[in-house]
Image: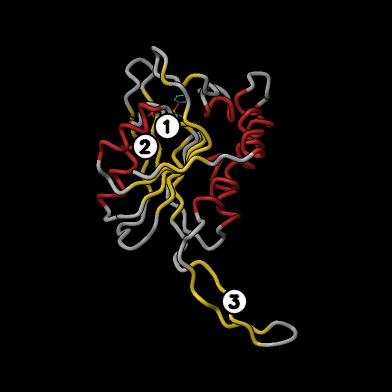
Amino acid sequence: MQVQIVDHPLAAARLTTMRDKTTDNAAFRGALSDLTQMLVYEALAGAPSVTVPIETPLTAHEGSRLATPPLLVPVLRAGLGMVEQAHAMVPEAHVGFVGVARDETTAQPVPYLESLPGDLSGLPVFVLDPMLATGGSMLHTIELLVARHATDITAVCVVAAPEGVAALEKSGHPVRLVVAAVDDGLNDVAYIVPGLGDAGDRQFGPR
Ligand code: PRP
Ligand code: URA
């Protein structure tokens, strides 16, 4: 599986803001939005383009645009904080939604929402979720996508644990990971360390 770590001073600065426990909800959401722009930009490097004939004010010109905009799939709740900025980067993209909440005692994913197109053949898909911890929530989402014939899936995350990366690798599903950092590991309640805490709570408050 391809793992692309977005290593840039501006990405590192936003990630530091997100990790800092004194950052308030609004500043956390702002840093996540900025970082999403960088992650999506990097995730689309090398994506196929098509030529578009246009007229500049001076002459005819062969421009270009994305050949196939990806379907954006935020994983609720925390992925909601990524979708507006990702959509701003790719305004022509369609958006699907998946809702999953980890059971706090077992860390198993508990699905509660899916709103996705029925057939994803030939369509790249970007799954937006800041946290890849055990990988359970991401794998649940990927399985929904593969069942709809997706064959080109990118997990766009802020922080991953090595355990989550290994789970995606082991699944054999057609996925690559674009991420700002791979951290040390999980603690005894399956939180990423050093991590940034609960990405949903830090944006929206406790549930
Ligand atoms: C967080 C996060 C991921 C999941 C990662 O969501 O946004 O979806 O945990 O953990 P995993 O890799 O072990 O599955 P959470 O379940 O806390 O829900 P929330 O976004 O509503 O806060
Ligand atoms: N979900 C989060 O929001 N944070 C973690 O560290 C692990 C799962």
Residue 143's place in the image compared with 27, above or below, is below
Q: Residue at x 65, y 34 (%)?
A: 14
Q: Is residue 26 left or right of residue 156?
A: right
Q: Is the CB–ligand 1 distance for label 1 below 8 Å?
A: yes
Crowd band around label 2 with a 10 angstrom C-alpha radius: few (<14), some (14–19), many (20+) = many
Mark 2: which amino acid? Answer: Met
Amino acid type at mark 3: Gly
| Residue 43 picture location, percent across and down | 49, 51
Disc 2 on helix, strand or loop? helix
Instruction: Reply above or below: 188 against 40.
Output: above
- Find residue 138 and name its label: 2
User: Element at badge 1?
Assistant: strand
**Split into 4 quadrants, where in the image is the N terminus?**
top left
Instruction: Please name which of the two marks, 2 or 3, marks the residue nearer to the observer.
Output: 3
Mark 3: secondary structure = strand
Q: Position of residue 96 (x, y in %)?
A: 42, 51
Residue sitting nearer the eye, 36 or 48: 48
Please name the residue shown 57% across and 60% down the image: 91
User: Disc number at residue 63?
Assistant: 3
Q: Position of residue 73 (x, y in %)?
A: 44, 48
- Of callouts 3 and 1, the N-terminal one: 3
Classed neighbour count for the residue bearing mark 1: other residues with Cα under 10 Å, few (<14), some (14–19), many (≥20)? many
Q: Earlier in the sequence, mark 2 or mark 3?
A: 3
Residue found at x 28% / y 43%: 143
Q: Are marks 2 and 1 in contact (CB under 8 Å)?
A: yes
Residue 101 position, x and y percent, is 40, 29
| Label 2 – label 1 distance at C-alpha | 7 Å
Q: Residue at x 32, y 24 (%)?
A: 108
Residue corresponding to mark 1: 132
Return the disc, 2 or 1, that comes first in the chain's sequence.
1
**Residue at disc 2, CB closer than 8 Å to ligand 1:** yes
